[in-house]
Amino acid sequence: MVSLARAKRTAKEAAFYLTKQAGVEKIQAESLTVRYSFFPPSRRAYDLDNLVASMKAAADGIALAIGVDDSKWNIAVSPRGPVERNGMVKVELEWEA
């Protein structure tokens, strides 16, 4: 069984490296908008606040990769997408230099 701490560390590291892999470098911005689009793994109902909260470790990894603390983020949530095998979250960053 995977510990919660290990799962969070894995999510943070994955988000960091996926952000870098997407070609996003350090951002010079006072604030930015982060848009989450959730594609659930099943048709069951998911609470929106829990979906956003589940992104905390990944948000920390993204913040580390882009150099903008997540306290300066504006969170936006797109309507939920269709069911995706194993689930997926699409993250979009918007800012002005």
Image (tube, grey):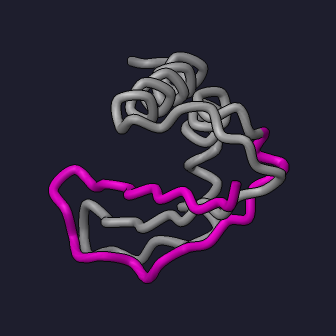
Most distant residue in the front direction = 97
- Establish if 34 lies above or below 18: below
Q: Position of residue 53 (x, y in %)?
A: 64, 54
Picture quarter with the C terminus:
bottom right
In the displayed structure image, the side of residue 37 where residue 3 appears, left or right: right
Based on the displayed image, in which of its 4 quarters is residue 17 positioned? top left
Q: Position of residue 52 (x, y in %)?
A: 60, 60
- Establish if 88 lies above or below 22: below
- Establish if 87 lies above or below 75: above
- Establish if 45 lies above or below 17: below
Taking the magenta stretch, the answer to whether it contains residue 77 is: yes
Most distant residue in the left direction = 85
The residue drawn where x is 73% and y is 64% is 74
The residue drawn where x is 15% and y is 56% is 85
Could you say which is closer to the camera, residue 68 or residue 60?
A: 68
The residue drawn where x is 38% and y is 56% is 89
Q: Position of residue 28 (x, y in %)?
A: 73, 42
The residue drawn where x is 42% and y is 67% is 37
Highlighted range, magenta: 69-97
Could you say which is closer to the camera, residue 19 or residue 48?
A: 19
Could you say which is closer to the camera, residue 87 or residue 72?
A: 72
Q: Position of residue 1 (x, y in %)?
A: 39, 18
Based on the displayed image, in which of its 4 quarters is residue 82 positioned? bottom left
In the displayed structure image, the side of residue 88 where residue 95 appears, left or right: right
Taking the magenta stretch, the answer to whether it contains residue 60 is: no
Counting labels gives 0
